[in-house]
């Protein structure tokens, strides 16, 4: 009798495990990601263990103040079929809306990549990617029950920069606007007449732009930087270090290029 009870318990456990392992899952992949400020990256919306699948409508919540969605595209799961695919980026409501349906008869079973989402990190912090609504349909237009798994993105800034930047209220070096899109005006008031050099560095320490003003010029210096390197190459979005130095002064500030 004792052995019979043990066999029954094992059978129930194996049956429950089998049912659970075959549950349809919709998930963000990777479920957790670390990226750098202003870098671009990609997440995938995946589906697992689905049968007779032919259409879906998904609303994904995010924080548009911290993430800029660059592109949404269909991935490989429905690649064998001609589909209707429609995606909307609603940054005001912080929602990505994606719909896709196989045109004509047809369906897919199994697991695979459903959607690719490319984005750019705009602000440090943690951003949740949450499924707000999920409507997956089978060949009979019945809603497929699913388990959803959300994701999170951790955005890290170049913290070492902040430790080196002067923050005193009487700093003479300024950039406006900052952040900027196409150009920024750089202003500096020299304490004494001297040759003054301006340098702009990437966050990796590479010198990308320089500008010199001789000692005979006005002590109130102003010029415009158009987000290009010294050889005219248009630079990508990111954090840059603006440095001014002469024999009497050294200052450094952070400037941010956004496109």
Image (spheres, rainbow, N blue to C red):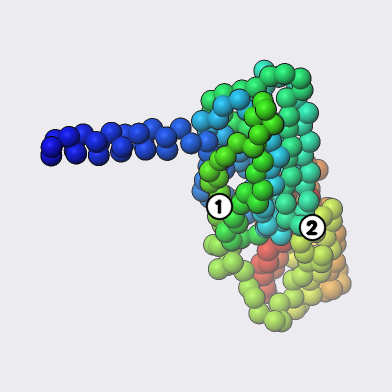
Q: Which mark is residue 108?
A: none
Which quarter shows the N terminus? Answer: top left
Q: Is residue 140 above or below residue 216?
A: above
Residue 108, x across and y down, in percent: 61, 23
Lateral position of residue 109 relative to residue 249, left or right:
left
Q: Nearer the viewer, residue 1 or 28?
A: 1
The number of discs equals 2
Which residue is found at the position 38% from the left and 32% from the top? Answer: 18
Q: Which residue is mark 2?
A: 92
Q: Secondary structure at mark 1?
A: strand
Q: Which mark is on residue 152?
A: 1
The answer to the question of whether label 1 and label 2 lie on touching residues, with beta carbons closer than 8 A, is no
Badge 1 or badge 2: first in the primary sequence: 2
Instruction: Give whichever of 21, 236 is nearer the camera.
Output: 21
Which quadrant of the structure image shows residue 58?
top right
Does residue 178 lie above or below 133 as drawn?
below
Name the residue located 51 percent from the left edge and 48 percent from the top edge. Answer: 32
Is 83 in front, or is 202? 83
Judged from this view, the residue extending furthest toward the front is 1
Question: Residue drawn at (57%, 34%), measured in percent from left and top?
Answer: 47
Which residue ends up furthest to the bottom in the rendered image?
Answer: 170
* Displayed quadrant of residue 8: top left
Residue 98 screen position, x and y as percent: 73, 40
The secondary element bearing badge 2 is classed as: loop
């Amino acid at each position: 009798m004792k052995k019979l009870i043990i066999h029954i318990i094992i059978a129930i456990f194996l049956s429950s495990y089998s049912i659970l392992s075959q549950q349809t899952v919709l998930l963000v992949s990777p479920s957790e990601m670390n990226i750098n400020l202003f870098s671009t990256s990609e997440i995938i919306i995946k589906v697992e263990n689905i049968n007779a699948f032919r259409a879906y409508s998904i609303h994904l919540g995010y924080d548009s103040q911290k993430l800029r969605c660059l592109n949404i595209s269909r991935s490989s799961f429905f690649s064998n079929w001609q589909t209707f695919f429609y995606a909307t980026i609603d940054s005001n409501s912080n929602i990505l809306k994606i719909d896709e349906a196989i045109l004509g008869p047809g369906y897919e079973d199994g697991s695979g990549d459903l959607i690719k989402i490319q984005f750019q990190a705009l602000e440090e912090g943690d951003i949740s990617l949450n499924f707000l609504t999920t409507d997956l349909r089978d060949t009979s237009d019945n809603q497929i029950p699913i388990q959803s798994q959300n994701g999170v993105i951790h955005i890290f800034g170049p913290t070492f920069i902040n430790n080196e930047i002067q923050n005193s209220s009487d700093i003479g070096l300024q950039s406006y606007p900052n952040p900027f899109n196409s150009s920024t005006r750089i202003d500096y008031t020299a304490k004494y007449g001297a040759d003054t050099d301006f340098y702009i560095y990437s966050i990796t320490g590479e010198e990308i732009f320089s500008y010199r003003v001789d000692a005979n010029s006005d002590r109130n210096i102003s010029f415009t930087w158009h987000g290009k390197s010294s050889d005219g190459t248009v630079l990508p979005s990111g954090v840059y270090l603006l440095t001014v130095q002469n024999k009497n002064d050294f200052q450094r500030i952070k400037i941010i290029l956004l496109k």
